[in-house]
Image: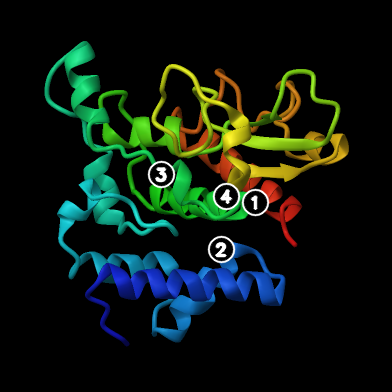
Amino acid sequence: MSTLSTTAQVEQLQREATSLHRSAGIPLADAFDRIAAQQGHVNWASLMRHVSEFIDSRGAFARPAVPFTRTPEQMRIAMREVAGRGAQADGAAKKNVFDISGEFASPRDAVDFSIAFMMCLLSAPRFKVYRSAQVYWEMRWWLPYCVSEVRDHDETDVRILLNRHYKPVGMVPSDWVKYEDFPNLQASLTRRQRLRLTRPWAQEGYLFDDGCPPWDSRRAAVDYLDRLHVLRALLAP
């Protein structure tokens, strides 16, 4: 069994898993498990538990790597409630969430990042996401909520990945932004494709709605992860 002691080593394995997923045409989760098996572990979750023994837990509060790198232990730390109440607690939770919208080379990279994030989140034995936790705001800002027109009343199939605040995925909300300035998060998706990724009874192109956000429950998180896999398949070269 190999010993991994740096985030750089984990990032390399994630790149290998993503490459295997694309070249072999297998689900991303299966690719991660195969790479973990090469390292002597039963699956990716087992490998991450092993890594968490070596990587400092403060990595939960570091600027995230793209592709996503965080151990289950780091994720559990990021899921903890921040001390304080109301706006004070929210502000403390938000301060460690960075703008990463410009770090994705393509929509595929953004979705791969989101899939890895959700897989790590779901590895937590007790699924509970508090509003006053770092993870809550990461999910609202870093993960895709919908695919939307780049311009109002745009008749083309070009869509951009937006977060829950209708900003480009990965962006910390600002007062105003031009979607056209983010070609790295744009892709062509036909209406039929958009319907495939849409949650039942949600507006077209929406992966979830306010009745089932992925931070609400494990069941909602699993359903959202399934839709991320659909979106990833639609974005495949």
- Give the amino acid at mark 3: Ile
Which residue: 29% across, 65% down? 49
Residue that badge 1 annotates: 229
Give the camera-side residue of 95 and 50.
95
Q: Residues within 10 Å of mark 1 (few under 14, many from 20)?
A: some
Q: Position of residue 124 (x, y in %)?
A: 34, 49
Q: Which mark is residue 111?
A: 4
Q: Nearer the viewer, mark 3 or mark 4?
A: 3
Q: Nearer the viewer, mark 3 or mark 1?
A: 3
Cα–Cα span, label 3 and label 1:
21 Å
- Image quadrant in which the C terminus is located: bottom right
Q: Earlier in the sequence, mark 1 or mark 2?
A: 2
- Give the amino acid at mark 1: His
- Give the amino acid at mark 2: Ala
Q: Nearer the viewer, mark 2 or mark 4?
A: 4
Q: Earlier in the sequence, mark 4 or mark 1?
A: 4
Residue that badge 3 annotates: 100
Cβ atoms at labels 4 and 1 below 8 Å apart: no
Cβ atoms at labels 3 and 1 below 8 Å apart: no
- Compared to 71, does 62 lie above or below? above
Question: Horizontally, is 171 left or right of 207 in the view?
Answer: left
Secondary structure type for disc 1? helix
Secondary structure type for disc 4? helix
Cβ atoms at labels 3 and 4 below 8 Å apart: no
Q: Position of residue 18 (x, y in %)?
A: 56, 68
Give the camera-side residue of 97 and 212.
97
Residue that badge 2 annotates: 29
- Compared to 33, does 159 lie above or below? above
Cβ atoms at labels 1 and 2 below 8 Å apart: yes
Which residue: 27% across, 78% down? 4
